[in-house]
């Protein structure tokens, strides 16, 4: 029942009929409706249609979450000191003359196709590899057409293209057979040249 702030008895329910003061009720005020955000632009939405962009909240085709992006593979190219030390320790006619680069920034290449060529650019021979390892710094052991990354049924392999100095993987010292796919997994390392390492990563 409404009550007068001054304690008067009143028969009305909006203002006291004795002193005219506004009456209060013991009932709490109604709760504010929950705020709904537009699924298209994110602004607060009242009713079916957004006043900002006109989005229809009942349109499930546009309010559904977008599909997840497909996985992307990368090759991360670095100067690998541990691999360089193994190359020097194995000897060879030019081992004593090789030097590890003082600075070689990391490079990242998206594996955008099912066949990714690796090597050094040669305009005179018309060779333009997808993963171009042309310096500086220049790795003298990388051939112009050195290797190929090949994706078959969603899995990557490395193929040595009969390069001069061969290709190895991870911590092995035995080169992969030329012109033969060697399977790779996420995180595997491909070594070529004197100090170049490609790490295959799934982003």
Image (cartoon, rainbow, N blue to C red):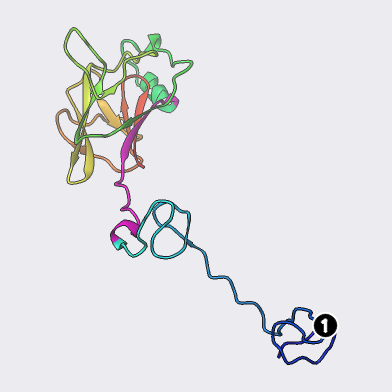
The residue closer to the viewer here, 121 or 144, is: 121
Quadrant occupied by the N terminus? bottom right
Magenta segment range? 61-81
Q: Residue at x 33, y 35 (%)?
A: 74
In the rendered structure, the answer to whether residue 31 lies left or right of residue 52 reads: right
> Residue 164's quadrant in the figure?
top left
The answer to whether 80 is drawn above or below residue 153 in the figure is: above
- In the image as oriented, which residue stretches furthest toward the right? 6
Q: Residue at x 35, y 57 (%)?
A: 65
- Would you say residue 136 sits in the magenta stretch? no
Image coordinates of residue 34 in percent, x first then y, are 53, 68
Q: Residue at x 39, y 51 (%)?
A: 53
- Would you say residue 74 sits in the magenta stretch? yes
The residue closer to the viewer here, 34 or 69, is: 34
* Mark 1: secondary structure: loop
**Tag 1 residue:** 19
Image coordinates of residue 56 in percent, x first then y, are 35, 60
Quadrant occupied by the C terminus? top left
The answer to whether 69 is drawn above or below residue 111 in the figure is: below
In the rendered structure, the answer to whether residue 122 lies left or right of residue 74 reads: left
> Residue 125's quadrant in the figure?
top left
């Amino acid at each position: 029942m409404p009550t007068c702030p001054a304690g008067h008895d009143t028969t009305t329910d909006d203002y006291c009929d004795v002193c005219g003061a506004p009456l209060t009720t013991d009932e709490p005020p109604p709760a504010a409706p929950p705020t709904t955000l537009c699924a298209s632009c994110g602004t607060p939405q009242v009713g079916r249609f957004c006043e900002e962009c006109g989005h229809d909240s009942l349109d499930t085709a546009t309010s559904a979450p977008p599909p997840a992006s497909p996985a992307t593979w990368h090759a991360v190219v670095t100067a690998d000191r541990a691999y360089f030390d193994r190359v020097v320790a194995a000897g060879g006619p030019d081992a004593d003359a090789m030097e590890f680069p003082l600075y070689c920034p990391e490079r990242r290449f998206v594996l955008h196709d099912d066949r990714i060529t690796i090597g050094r650019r040669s305009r005179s021979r018309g060779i333009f590899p997808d993963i171009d390892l042309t310096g500086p710094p220049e790795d003298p052991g990388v051939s112009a057409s050195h290797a190929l990354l090949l994706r078959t049924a969603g899995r990557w392999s490395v193929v040595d293209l009969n390069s001069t100095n061969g290709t190895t993987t991870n911590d092995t010292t035995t080169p992969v057979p030329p012109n033969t796919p060697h399977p790779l997994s996420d995180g595997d390392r491909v070594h070529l040249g004197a100090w170049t390492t490609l790490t295959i990563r799934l982003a």
